[in-house]
Amino acid sequence: MSQLIDRRLNGRNKSAVNRQRFIRRYKSQIKQAVGDAIAGRSITDVDKGEQISIPSKDISEPIFHHAPSGRREAVHPGNHDFVTGDRIRRPNSGSASGGSGASPDGEGEDDFVFNLSQEEFLEFFFEDMALPDLVKTQLAKIDDYKSVRAGYTPSGVPTNIDVVRSLRGALARRMALGAPHRRQIRELEATLEALLSECAEDDSERIRSLRDEIAELRQRIERIPFLDTFDLRYRNRVRQPTPASQAVMFCLMDVSGSMDATRKDIAKRFFILLYLFLTRNYEHIEVVFIRHHTTAMEVDEHDFFYARETGGTVVSSALELTYEVIRDRYPSSQWNLYVAQASDGDNWSDDSPLCRDLLIEKIMPCLQYYAYVEIEAEKPQNLWMEYEKVQAACENFAMQRIRTPGDIYSVFRELFRKRLS
């Protein structure tokens, strides 16, 4: 019985499999920690990794072992002094015991802490999220490719050699090159057999000549190479263009005077998450940034997040600019169109009905999806009231309220969760 011994050195990621297994096992705790981390981070640190703490009681594993002998202590159902996870002795201390320091939940051992990398952090955060109703459009602009098999080629790299095809070619070559010799051998053998039947002596000059000639022909056949470089065939693969989805996301942010620093910070966090989500999950997507107060303007990424210009509030200016950009540069027949809007909802009373009409009559028929978040700590504003009518009229319109930074995570996931078709 043969045995294979792998003597390769361990790579840098030798514990990657165990790490992935560990992450899958404590997925719920990690997702909860990721959500809490997003709420408390600054804008510049929103995409960094995270240090995850898992209670030690969750790390323990059930095992089979011999029952302990002698005197034992146990907690039975119905007691008033212990809670789930306690390991005896709670009544004496009233809190945690053991270890160098107690954890906040009263455990006697320190929590297990490990670092979640940036890639793993974002993977958890954007899990089960997708742009809704994304369809393939604009097949003319194709720059996605996939590698497909395209027969065989006489040149290539050794890893692509097709052994069966190469040996089949070698066999055909040997049969073709040796066929004339084998035909001559058959003719000479027939002549030799006839001479031997007629002549009693088998050492005549003619018979020796025929035997030498047959032997030389057999040597010629044996000298034909078993495998020649001409026989080698390589699997050929070509890049085949594939249809790609084109999409554009319009980011509309209210920067009016009513949007104080806290509300702007929440709006920026929301759009940064949205930007990370788009750039991480989609290659063919464009982002249009629009800031507005009384007037709206299309800006670049830096001005969208860091410009300090402010003023009054006319939300319809941003919607009109959005519609103009769609009409001029992104026709709905060729693009998947999405809009995300963040505002405190404080709008001129006569402008909110205009926003409602603009959305229902012009913008929503062009869009795949419209997500509106209202950043407000108290009651809904007049813009929210009008947008509720839009939501009732259009299925692809969604709206949520963000009251504190801690709501960003749940609201973002609710707006862009993957929907079953």
Image: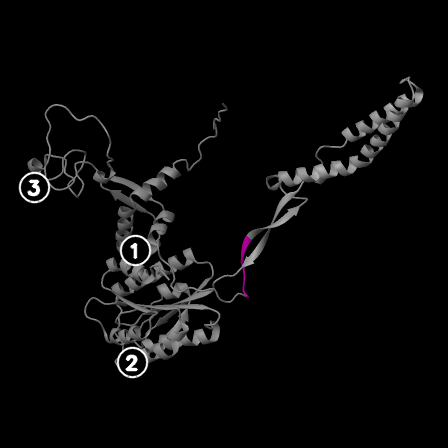
Query: Which tag, 2 or 1, sits closer to the chain's start?
Result: 1
The mark closer to the camera, 2 or 1, is: 2
Spot occupied by residue 272 in the image (x, y as percentages of width and height): 35, 60
Spot occupied by residue 88 in the image (x, y as percentages of width and height): 11, 34
Q: What stretch is highlighted in magenta?
A: 140-146
Instruction: Say which amino acid is labelled 2.
Output: Pro
Q: Name the residue under label 2.
A: 353
For this view, does 79 lie left or right of residue 47? left
Crowding at dot 2, Cα within 10 Å, few <14 / some 14-19 / many 20+, comes out as some
- The residue that appears at 47% across and 63% down in the rendered structure is 245
The mark closer to the camera, 3 or 1, is: 3
Instruction: Say which amino acid is labelled 1.
Output: Ser
- The residue that appears at 44% across and 35% down in the rendered structure is 11
213 vs 310, nearest the viewer: 213
| Helix, strand or loop under label 1 | loop
Q: Name the residue under label 1.
A: 42
Spot occupied by residue 298 in the image (x, y as percentages of width and height): 41, 71
- The residue that appears at 30% across and 61% down in the rendered structure is 414
| Helix, strand or loop under label 2 | helix
User: Quick one: quadrant of the C terminus?
Assistant: bottom left
Q: What is the C-alpha distance between the residues marked 3 and 1?
A: 46 Å
Q: What is the C-alpha distance between the residues marked 3 and 2?
A: 60 Å
Q: Do the residues labelled 3 and 2 touch (CB within 8 Å)?
A: no
Q: Mark 3 points at which residue?
A: 78
Q: Are marks 2 and 1 in contact (CB under 8 Å)?
A: no
Spot occupied by residue 237 in the image (x, y as percentages of width and height): 60, 49
Residue farthest to the right? Answer: 205
Q: What is the C-alpha distance between the residues marked 2 and 1?
A: 36 Å
Q: Are marks 3 and 1 in contact (CB under 8 Å)?
A: no
Instruction: Say which amino acid is labelled 3.
Output: Gly
